[in-house]
Amino acid sequence: MINRILLRIKIVQIVFAYYKSGEKDYGVAEKELFHSIEKTYDLYYHLLLLAIEVTRYARNKIEARLQKYRPTEDELNPNRRFADNRFIEQLEANEMFMERVDKKKLSWIDSPEVVKSLYDTIVASESYQSYMNSETNDYIADKELWRKIFRNEILNNEALPIALEEQSIYWCAEADFVISFILKTIKKFDESKGAKQALLPMYNHEEDKVFAQRLFGDTLRNGKEYRALIEEFTKNWELDRIAYMDVIIMMVALAELHDFPSIPVNVTLNEYIEIAKQYSTDKSGTFVNGVLDKIVTHLKKEGALMKAN
């Protein structure tokens, strides 16, 4: 699930924190990196669990209405389609899902306002109304409803960011990314696989963990060298006036250029230019692009960069 795009972002963030903290303990920093990766994977399960909790909330409302002293005809004969959604029932029984939820003690018990708010928003949505009144009642329709809910209602729920931030400092910024993988997960669900349906693994590819470890380690081991190189090619700038995040982004980019000859130069440059655009200043993308381009040209002339474009 966690691909190299997110790994690069996380490495930039942890390297930034490493230099800002002043502690300079590599072991602690590496643990923090892999802890943050683990927490992103937990968010994937936590948000899937939210779908189950909202469905349980719907079931409880139906049961409460049935227990009324004088239930109405509608309350005695409720439309249970949402409450009995087959995708959710399969997820509730999923062995891989339940094992990690139990192991990590994931729960929404402390955020009832998110569950209620989301349920109310879902019930008021056009997708819900269309689903409840449709003549098409099958597993595919059940999955598609939850794809729409994740894409529209969950992603835009106002109560969610506060609840996520209380759980982890990493989660708010990563919710969009994780939901994109939940959408892919739901699409892949197969009713015939029942409780054995596989969820996404933590890493997109097993070698990505090694990639993260090597890139992070190389950045810190050779940090002084990369910083000196950046300073050499920003002579017209005072280094302490350059956005510190830009310096960190370029340091990690140089580590990748140095340590991963199989990754084309243009791929590396494009990735870090995008990170600069998203996580630094408005002008950072152009600035990082210009400096790295000069450094790459210099390294090629010196024969210090032997890799594909």
Image: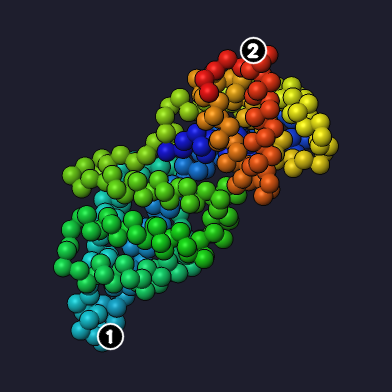
| Residue 15 visible (yes or no) | no
Please provide percent x and percent y for residue 309: 53, 23
- Tell me: 48 left or right of 291: left
Residue 192, quarter of picture: top left
**Residue positioned 48% across, 64% down in the render:** 157
Q: Amino acid at mark 2?
A: Gly
Q: Are marks 1 and 2 in contact (CB under 8 Å)?
A: no
Please provide percent x and percent y for residue 204: 42, 33
N-terminal label among 1 and 2: 1
Foreground of the two, 274 or 121: 274
In the drawing, what numbered circle is on residue 303? 2
**Separation (CA) of disc 1 from disc 2:** 85 Å
**Residue positioned 41% across, 70% down in the render:** 121
**Residue positioned 27% across, 41% down in the render:** 197
Residue 237, quarter of picture: top right
Please provide percent x and percent y for residue 117: 45, 69
Foreground of the two, 202 or 53: 202
119 vs 279: above or below: below
- Tell me: 113 left or right of 306: left
Residue position for label 1: 69
201 vs 229: above or below: below
In the drawing, what numbered circle is on residue 161? none
